[in-house]
Image (cartoon, grey):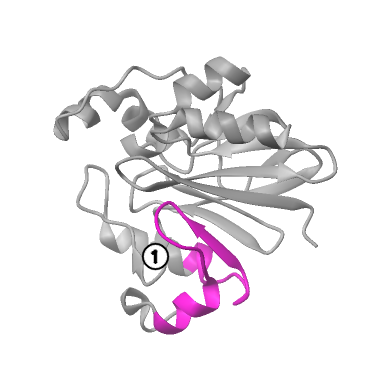
Amino acid sequence: MAPVEVICLTNGAFQENCYIVIDRETKESVVVDPGEDSELFLRRINYEGVHVEAVWLTHAHLDHILGVKHVVEQTGAPIYLHPDDRSLYDSIQEQASWLGLQADEQPQPGHELAHGGQVAVGESTFEVRHVPGHSPGGVAFVGYGLAIVGDAIFDGSIGRTDLPGGDSETLLTSIREQLLVLPDETLVYPGHGPATTIGKERKSNPFLSGGS
């Protein structure tokens, strides 16, 4: 059994996947991509009886960061973000205006994620892999036979690249060099939709024919 448990909470108008990753031994946790329904995440944290060590962000699009402020206010957890998405993060109100929405400014990230670096939940560590293309600072968290990949890759699809900072060739290169090199049985937890595996996407994802 892996030393971590991953809880997926699909939420909000964007049907975004927020993940709570729990170290089974220490009962420490992190919240990955707290989207719109922050109350849902906080209720689940309380139900699980875990302490939140950090907020990890795979990227800084609106639907993945709307709940950061409330989660941080309630837990005091520091925020981890890749610096290439900092300008996107700081423009949350502009992002919201594109969709006719409103959003509060979010608290400032205190830690920068770097490709090849490590982040920890309790005594469990994950590798950070930079997977730009959907956004400039997109990352995946990889370890223990799983990968939390944000909006880089989905079950049968890949992330959109028509938003500011997106680039389709960059995304395809990122997927092939950083994700498809993982073992086939690696569980993939995307930012939207159901979980999948690297093997399934290598074989049948129509955007990735030709594979790794």
Relative vertical location of residue 60 with respect to residue 134 in this rendering, above or below? above
Relative to 209, 202 lies left or right: right
Relative to 93, 45 lies left or right: right
Q: In which quarter of the image is the N terminus?
A: bottom right
The image position of residue 42, as x and y in percent, is 56, 29
Relative vertical location of residue 154 with respect to residue 99 in this rendering, above or below? below
The image position of residue 74, as x and y in percent, is 57, 17
Q: What stretch of residues is rendered in magenta?
A: 177-204
Q: Residue at x 33, y 58 (%)?
A: 159
Name the amino acid, label 1: Thr
The image position of residue 194, as x and y in percent, is 46, 62
- Which of the pair 54/86 is nearer the observer? 54
Relative to 126, 90 lies left or right: left
Specify few, some or many for label 1: CA neighbours under 10 Å numbering under 14, 14-19, or 20 or more.
Answer: some
Badge 1 marks a residue whose secondary structure is helix
State whether residue 212 appears in this view.
Answer: no
State whether residue 195 appears in this view.
Answer: yes
Q: Where, by quadrant of the figure, is residue 27 drawn?
A: top right
The image position of residue 148, as x and y in percent, is 54, 53
- Which of the pair 2/110 is nearer the observer? 2
- Which of the pair 163/70 is nearer the observer? 70
Q: Which residue is at the far right? A: 25
Instruction: Report if residue 32 lies within the magenta region.
Output: no
Q: Where, by quadrant of the figure, is residue 199 drawn?
A: bottom right
Q: Which residue is drawn at 41% across and 32% down?
A: 65
Residue wearing tag 1? 173
Relative vertical location of residue 99 with respect to residue 58 in this rendering, above or below? above
